[in-house]
Image: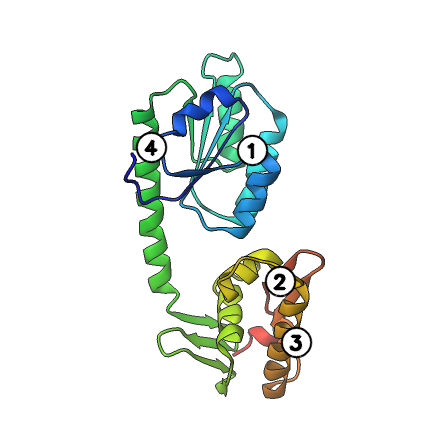
């Protein structure tokens, strides 16, 4: 699948199996820490993890990944293991989409990647269409017209303020890390004091919201040492 348009992130705990992805356009993480780091910074269409033997922390890693992204996850492991079925259930329940034999041919893996990525892209298109207009309590965002209203009062936001608010409001309660926010809002690789840059933007945005209605800025919730999320309190939920 040399001509694939899908962006794939891969990790294998055994270097000998890395040859599976010599012909696939993928980024390779040398360890699980780098894998999580890359997922927090960059956008991928697919995640492939190869683990030869049972490792208890893999399920925890998958659960952690699901808090960051909903991209398809393929796990390649040894199907001959006596623990295979129980571990397969554990991995699926943790958030994996597919568990395959690590000795599968590259063609079999290719087909599974194509199938899951195609389904995921269709879901993205459907979600994008449904998110053209956001109605969250007193907040209304018309993405086509690039207009924002709080309790029917227009807000005049900068491009970055708008993109930040839209990012959070489109997925309420989801926590975005500072790195994710910087990459998605500023469209750049996170360097320098990004926490302070984002904090200044949040301060300005909260001030504009609070001018319209006292306490409106509280919908932007700080998650200490991690990032921000969008959450409405009972007062702000009332239209």
In the rendered structure, which disc, 2 or 1, sits on the residue that comes first in sequence? Answer: 1
Q: Which residue is mark 2?
A: 228
Q: Position of residue 104 (x, y in %)?
A: 37, 20
- Residue 81: give x, y in percent of width and height: 50, 13
Mark 4 lies on residue? 112
Residue 119 in percent (x, y) is at 32, 44
Task: Please tell me whether mark 2 or mark 1 is closer to you in this view.
Answer: 1
Mark 3: few, some, or many residues within 10 Å (few <14, many ≥20)? few
Residue 226, above or below 103: below
Rounded to the nearest whole Å, what is the CA distance between mark 3 and mark 4? 45 Å
Q: Earlier in the sequence, mark 4 or mark 2?
A: 4
Question: Badge 1 is on which residue?
Answer: 30
Q: Are marks 1 and 4 in contact (CB under 8 Å)?
A: no
Q: Earlier in the sequence, mark 2 or mark 3?
A: 3
Earlier along the polypeptide chain: callout 3 or callout 4? Answer: 4
> What residue is rendered at 37% in x and 69% in y?
132
**Which element type, helix, strand or loop, lies under badge 2?**
strand
**In this orientation, does residue 177 appear?**
no
| Residue drawn where x is 55% and y is 43% of the image | 65
Question: In the figure, is residue 25 to the left or right of 150?
Answer: left
The disc label shown at residue 104, or none: none
């Amino acid at each position: 699948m040399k001509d694939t348009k899908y962006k794939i992130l891969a990790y294998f705990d055994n270097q000998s199996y890395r040859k599976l992805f010599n012909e696939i356009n993928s980024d390779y993480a040398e360890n699980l820490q780098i894998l999580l780091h890359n997922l927090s910074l960059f956008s991928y269409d697919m995640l492939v993890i190869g683990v030869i033997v049972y490792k208890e922390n893999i399920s925890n890693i998958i659960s952690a990944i699901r808090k960051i992204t909903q991209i398809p996850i393929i796990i390649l492991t040894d199907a001959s293991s006596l623990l295979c079925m129980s571990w397969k259930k554990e991995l699926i329940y943790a958030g994996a989409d597919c568990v395959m034999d690590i000795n599968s041919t590259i063609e079999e893996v290719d087909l599974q990647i194509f199938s899951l990525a195609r389904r995921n892209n269709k879901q993205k298109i459907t979600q994008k269409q449904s998110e053209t207009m956001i109605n969250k309590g007193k907040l209304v965002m018309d993405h086509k017209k690039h207009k924002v209203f709080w309790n029917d009062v227009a807000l005049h936001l900068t491009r970055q303020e708008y993109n930040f608010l839209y990012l959070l409001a489109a997925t309420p309660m989801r926590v975005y890390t500072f790195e994710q926010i910087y990459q998605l809002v500023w469209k750049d690789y996170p360097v320098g004091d990004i926490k302070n840059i984002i904090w200044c933007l949040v301060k300005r945005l909260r001030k504009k919201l609070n001018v319209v209605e006292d306490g409106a800025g509280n919908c932007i919730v700080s998650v200490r040492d991690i990032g921000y999320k969008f959450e409405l309190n009972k007062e702000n939920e009332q239209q």
